[in-house]
Amino acid sequence: MTALSLSKPRRVRLLPLVALIFFSVSGGAYGIEELFSTSGPGIAVLLIVVTPLIYSVPHALVCAELGTAIPVEGGYYHWVKRGLGRFWGFQQGLLQWICSFVDMALYPVLFTSYLQSVAGFVAPGRHVLFRLGHLQFDLNWFICVAVIAVFTLLNLLGAGWVGESSVAFAAICLTPMLILTAVGAARLIGEGTNPVSTATATTDQSAWTAFGAGLFIVMWNYSGWDSVSNVAGEMENPRKHLPKALAVSVVLIMVGYLLPSIAALATGADGDAGWKGWEAGSFSEVARELAGPWLQLAVTIGGMFAAVAMFSALLASNSRLPLVLAQDGYFPQWMAKENRRYRAPVASIVGSAAVYALFCLSSFANLVIFDVFLTNIGILLEVAALIALRIREPELERPYRIPGGAFGITGIVVCLIGISVWAAWQQYVESGTQAVTYGLVVVAGSVLLYLPLSRLRDRRLRLAGADVPPEAAGVSTPA
């Protein structure tokens, strides 16, 4: 690799685009373990199969149409702004950036969850270095910060290099899961075991309750289809490659969850590796039970690479949100500055990474609840923008168009609204009003921020003697 090759911004090609979507949504079966201990094997497998049909595929279709019609940097921010206007575009951009605060903290935490299975001394709270009020800064947190720093540097090379590295990471993290699948399937077949003979986690848990309890977990594991749209301006031929990459990724991700999970059930329900005790990182113990320490180490390394690859891919996406908000005048202009050599938004990447490091101090479970709630708000805004653009701009060039006309759009709307409302209700039943309250507080704050930031933006434009740019008025020019 020469200095000359590094100096040229690399475009995201088709295979790296598939890898970016894969890691923006999934990263493999790592992290899905808690679904089985929460809902039971039968319901968990059902959720893995059904959720893509009613959640992932509808959202991927929305992303394919809007992403090919408006393939610009900042992706879904510009979709919503063009379809619904500046106010809603601002809400989409700011809320999804705030959502990324909790989302991005999940991956360094997941990294340390796998690491502690072979190095117990890194567990949270084991080695506290200092405290600041109620905040506890331990060795676990500093490892999270180190992970963030390394992949922040990678992102400063641009989205193209993040995509290229994601291909290599995919090979590293999927190989141990392929081995685990083969070993676990052989045991299931040899013992004549039906891995899903038990439907729910406990005998007194109804299928309905088990389905609702696991829905938030599996929705998080199937969310993020729109993330890659934020780097559409750095893709190679997004109008051709994006629908293909989304289609391949939907199948790859579902199979990547389903096969290793079923094979892992060969360990049974009880014991150190039994599914009743599974939590994030438990596949390491499953691997040891199935094949010994060598597979445990391989799965642990695979899980660690999956976690950091997800962080890297999503940092490339989320860091473009403050970039486009700054370009439209809502944030300071220095946040829109790009590195001349690699054309990466340095301030947005570094600033976002610093916030994510602070949020690593939160717990994994609480973060997932908050993340899914805000993510679904963003998805519903994208669906509204899709409908608005179909009505207001029927002549807009759409290289990919959702089939089925009004019937197809209606099916998507029913699926996405239905599952979002159902998940919110089940979360309320399980955990009360905490997640909804926090989510509504963030939404209210974003709404209140729009007026002063919009006025400040207009004042800056007047002082500069400039007209309102087309992008700020909700008009985007395809890349």
Image: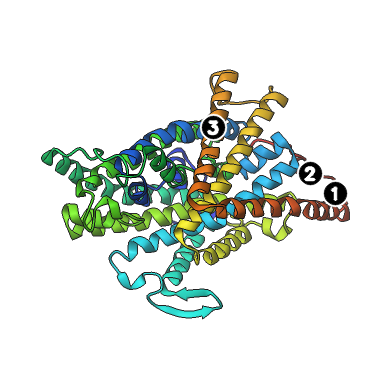
Q: Nearer the viewer, residue 315 or 378?
A: 378
Which residue is rendered at x = 37% and y = 38% of the image?
207
Q: Which residue is mark 1?
A: 466
Which mark is drawn over residue 21? none
- Judge from the rendering whether residue 18 lies leftward or rightward of residue 376; answer left or right: left
Q: Amino acid at mark 3?
A: Ala
Left or right placement of residue 188 versus residue 422 in this view: left
Give the Cα separation between the discs numbered 1 and 3: 35 Å
Q: Is residue 455 above or below residue 150?
A: above
- Residue 235, percent across and down? 54, 41
Q: Is residue 63 visible?
A: no
> Which residue is labeled 2 in the image?
469
In the image, residue 139 above or below residue 150: below
Callout 1 crowding tier (Cα within 10 Å): few <14, some 14–19, many ≥20:
few
Marks 2 and 3, how far apart in space?
Answer: 27 Å
Which quarter of the rendered picture does the N terminus lie within? bottom left
Q: What residue do we see at 56% from left, 53% from top?
A: 435
Q: Looking at the picture, which amino acid does disc 1 mark?
A: Ala
Which residue is drawn at the image coordinates 67% and 40% (left, top)? Answer: 78
| Amino acid bearing label 2 | Pro
Q: CA distance from mark 2 to mark 1?
A: 8 Å
Which image quarter: residue 305? bottom left
Q: Position of residue 143 (x, y in %)?
A: 42, 69
253 and 335: which is toward the camera: 253
Residue placed most toward the observer, 242 or 48 = 48
Q: Considering the numbered disc 2 on the image, is that residue within a helix, a strand or a loop?
A: loop
Numbered label tally: 3
